[in-house]
Image: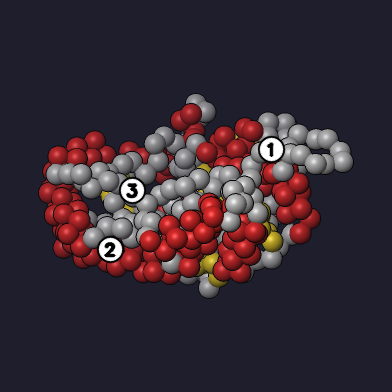
Amino acid sequence: MIPHSRPFIDPQDREEVDKALASGCLAQGEQVALFERDLCSFIGVRHGAAVSSGTAALHLALAALGTGPGDEVVVPSFVCSALLNAVHYTGAKAVPADIDPLTYNLDAVDTARRIGKKTKAIIVPHLFGTAADLDEVISLGVPVIEDCAQSVGSLYKGRFTGSRGLISIFSFYATKVIATGEGGMAVSNDGGLMESIRDLREYDGKANYRIRFNYKMTDFQAALGRSQLRKLPAFIERRREIAGRYNETLGKLGVAVPQTRPDRDHIYYRYVLPRPPETFLKAMQEMGVGCRKPVFKPLHGYLGLSGYPNTEAAWRKSVSVPIYPGLNDDEIRAVTEAMKEACSRS
């Protein structure tokens, strides 16, 4: 079975983790500080704070903005429930908005309709590896948190995603673009907000008391993250190469392939096709290829809301097929052959 997702860890990664373990510093230390420096330098921002997960980074970003009970946070409905959790950790209310049917990202026009007097922030994920309409959302005048969990290394109007939001967050989960097993980071050019995030992630040794969180990253995770970050350009090149082969195969079948807007690029964290999930997933499974719905359930569904036509359409008719740097050429051929058969059935 070819899995839907698979980490790519090579001997160099293992060597860097071994060095960190041999140093005797297992918790947050020098490697964490260097990882923060390296990612900020890559993205083009001044300050970073590595944490235990992308959800933790999002929680602390909201907390640093003073988000709490009585506030509202606008989020896209077509996204994983981690965003819902992070908003609810603060006691605020999540307000889902509909998506752009081309990119599956947050729709700026619908977002504008969801903003009210209680709106504290807008979370803008760059879903599946291509940027959302960031300038249009920023122009709405509400603090924007970029969610780059699936887009590290992608460009929007010539700059990396994560460089424009008031705060931006990253996830380094095992199967993300770069991986530390678990882990995340918040970055910003606002030193005051980042100082608050650093204070909140470390719970002891403080002169005053407030609720803080045990959200630190370990040094051996950071060592792995630094090693993975050095390979990011090669990772993206391989993803695009695989996407090109999929595009060629599906184009001959007349099947729509992933698209983006002209002023941004695509790193293909996910390769999402407009197919009926039940039929397609079953056919791919029978041929030894693991596929999934790209979003398990829209957020408005969890909240019992209606009025999200683009999200509903995407949820009913989208599937994600394997695309990651560790796929070898034989596996890529197997996936393309399986897609031909599955598309003929669906």
The spot of residue 272 in percent (x, y) is 32, 51
Q: Which residue is mark 3?
A: 5
Q: Residue 84 sits in which quadrant?
A: top right
Q: Nearer the viewer, mark 3 or mark 1?
A: 1
Quadrant containing the N terminus is top left
Query: Does residue 125 show up?
Result: no
Relative to 203, is 37 above or below? below
Q: Amino acid at mark 1?
A: Phe
The spot of residue 86 in percent (x, y) is 60, 38
Q: Which residue is mark 1?
A: 213
Q: Nearer the viewer, mark 1 or mark 2?
A: 1
Which secondary structure, mark 3? loop
**Tag 1 or tag 3, which sits nearer the N-term?**
3
> Furthest-bottom residue in view?
158
Which secondary structure, mark 1? loop
Relative to 237, is 162 above or below? above
Q: Which residue is mark 2?
A: 242
Q: Amino acid at mark 3?
A: Ser
